[in-house]
């Protein structure tokens, strides 16, 4: 019985190779070379302590993945005061900074680096306005938070700041260089 099956499969193999659709098998899709020159941009996204505590990390990652952006680095960490002072260096003299510092030290954060075409500007749009009350439904802040003091996430506001923030939160060996199989389906 097994010998008969083996003979039948062996005789069908040449036809399968030359006409795979005759057997309900899809031929492999030719992979186009994707040229990303000028399209790759990185951004720093952080899920703040309230987002981590509320279990929203997966939802936020999912939105960036569904958009087609590529995760290059990810870590859950407890930030230090020194790191937060560097990150928020332009806010240190503001009256609200002590509250911001207390909030950001209250628990772990999820630090991420995302890459893709226009990821800085689009990432900011996906997050929504800094004040959740001004965020449109469908944005992360519009869907998941209410108060500006607990606004779930941070996203770099420029390519230059993204590179500065990535350098603060990640060492070079913590960022991966890899190409997802979906890339040809996302870019021309």
Image (spheres, rainbow, N blue to C red):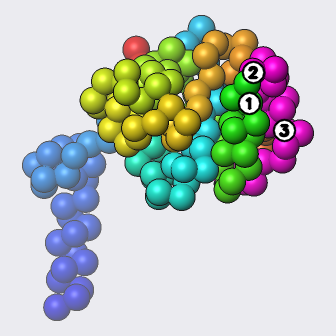
Q: Which residue is mark 2?
A: 94
Instruction: Residue at 22%, 75% (x, y): give it.
Output: 7
Name the foreground residue: 75 vs 157.
157
Q: Which residue is mark 3?
A: 83
Picture coordinates of residue 103 (x, y %)?
66, 45
Q: Determine contact: label 1, label 2, CB under 8 Å.
A: yes
N-terminal of the two: label 3 or label 1? 3
| Horizontal arrangement in the rendering, residue 170 relative to residue 7 (left or right) | right
Q: Quadrant of the N terminus?
A: bottom left
Gap in angstroms between the C-alphas marked 3 and 2: 17 Å
Residue indicated by mark 1 = 97
Q: Residue at x 69, y 36 (%)?
A: 100
Residue situated in front as seen by the camera: 95 or 121: 95
Q: Residue furthest bottom?
A: 1
Q: Judge whether residue 93 is colored magenta.
A: yes
Range drawn in magenta: 73-94
* Quarter occupied by the C terminus: top left
Q: Residue at x 31, y 24 (%)?
A: 136
* Cα separation between marks 3 and 1: 14 Å
Kindly identify the residue that appears in the image at 56 percent across and 18 percent down.
Answer: 120
Q: Is residue 11 above or below residue 128?
A: below
Dots 3, 1 in contact, CB < 8 A: no
Secondary structure at numbered mark 3: helix
| Residue 155 percent coordinates (x, y) | 58, 27
From what the image shows, is residue 180 above or below residue 2?
above
């Amino acid at each position: 019985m097994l010998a008969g099956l083996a003979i039948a499969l062996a005789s069908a193999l040449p036809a399968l190779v030359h006409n795979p659709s005759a057997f309900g098998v899809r031929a492999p899709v030719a992979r186009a070379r994707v040229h990303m020159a000028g399209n790759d941009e990185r951004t720093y996204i952080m899920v703040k302590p309230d987002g981590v505590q509320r279990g929203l990390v997966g939802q936020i990652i999912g939105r960036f993945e569904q958009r087609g952006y590529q995760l290059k680095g990810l870590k859950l960490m407890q930030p230090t005061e020194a790191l937060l002072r560097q990150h928020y260096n332009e806010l240190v003299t503001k009256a609200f900074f002590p509250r911001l510092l207390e909030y950001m030290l209250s628990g772990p954060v999820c630090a991420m680096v995302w890459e893709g075409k226009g990821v800085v500007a689009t990432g900011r749009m996906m997050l929504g306005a800094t004040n959740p009350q001004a965020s449109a439904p469908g944005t992360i802040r519009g869907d998941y938070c209410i108060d500006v003091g607990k606004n779930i996430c941070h996203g770099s506001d420029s390519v230059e700041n993204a590179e500065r923030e990535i350098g603060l939160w990640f060492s070079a060996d913590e960022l991966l260089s890899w190409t997802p199989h979906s890339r040809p389906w996302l870019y021309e």
